[in-house]
């Protein structure tokens, strides 16, 4: 599996699923058009772009380009690369009918097509070598951020202090924390 320095931005969870089978990277979902009104997620994208750089990988249909262009407007273009998948006609396995435009989306692409798109965009791909210790759910538990009586409020306080969206799921919070800091830095945080 190839490791990627940049954060990948996709439209939804099925796209994220397809990519996580191919690369070891932080992958954030826009929630489709929900990104237009989600100021917190827009801020998160800007923060991630400043820290790691963004690669936007949306479907090749009209909706994908609308989302891509919106991101171009809310994140410094110097910090964003754009990966494009080819127009391939067909339908995803999980769907009963093809999309409105009849094109496969990110989730329907073969792994090699996704890797080629990321390479063309200038992604920092490298073979996964020695594993860097990552922050895990067990670490969240050990720090009182999950599984405890007051863990939800502690998570909210941490997210506020780090200027992260308050509605991040536990899994999304892990992805973001791992993109922002090392496991040691996480344990050094005052909670």
Image: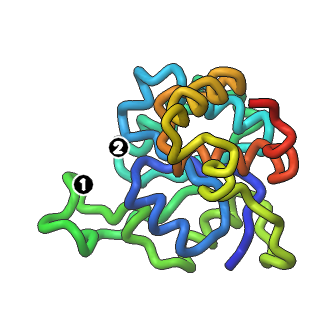
Q: Residues within 10 Å of mark 2 (few under 14, many from 20)?
A: few
The picture places residue 109, in percent across and down from the top left corner, at 43, 72
The one nearer the camera, 163 or 7, is 163
Say whether marks 2 and 1 touch (CB < 8 Å).
yes
Q: Residue at point 86% right, 51% down?
A: 184
> Which residue matches tag 2?
62
The picture places residue 26, in percent across and down from the top left corner, at 64, 54
Q: Residue at point 63% right, 41% down?
A: 144
The picture places residue 116, in percent across and down from the top left corner, at 63, 72
Q: Secondary structure at mark 2?
A: helix
> Which residue matches tag 1?
101
Res 89 quadrant in image:
bottom left
- Name which of mark 2 and mark 1 comes first in the sequence: 2
Q: For marks 2 and 1, give the CA distance.
A: 8 Å
In-image side of 57 versus 26 (left or right): left
- Compared with 135, 81 (above or below) is above
In-image side of 88 versus 173 (left or right): left
């Amino acid at each position: 599996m190839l490791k990627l320095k940049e954060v990948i931005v996709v439209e939804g969870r099925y796209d994220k699923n397809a990519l996580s089978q191919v690369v070891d990277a932080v992958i954030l979902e826009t929630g489709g058009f929900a990104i237009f009104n989600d100021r917190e997620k827009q801020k998160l994208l800007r923060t991630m772009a400043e820290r790691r750089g963004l690669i936007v990988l949306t479907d090749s249909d009209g909706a994908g380009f609308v989302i891509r262009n919106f991101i171009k407007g809310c994140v410094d273009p110097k910090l964003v690369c754009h990966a494009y998948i080819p127009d391939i006609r067909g339908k995803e396995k999980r769907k009963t009918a093809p999309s409105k435009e009849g094109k496969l989306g990110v989730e329907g692409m073969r792994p090699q097509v996704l890797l080629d798109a990321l390479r063309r965009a200038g992604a920092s791909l490298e073979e996964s070598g020695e594993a860097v210790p990552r922050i895990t759910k067990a670490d969240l538990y050990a720090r009182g951020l999950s599984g405890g009586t007051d863990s939800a409020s502690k998570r909210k306080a941490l997210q506020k202090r780090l200027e992260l969206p308050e509605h991040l799921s536990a899994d999304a919070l892990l992805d973001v924390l791992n993109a922002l800091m090392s496991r040691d830095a996480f344990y050094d945080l005052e909670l």
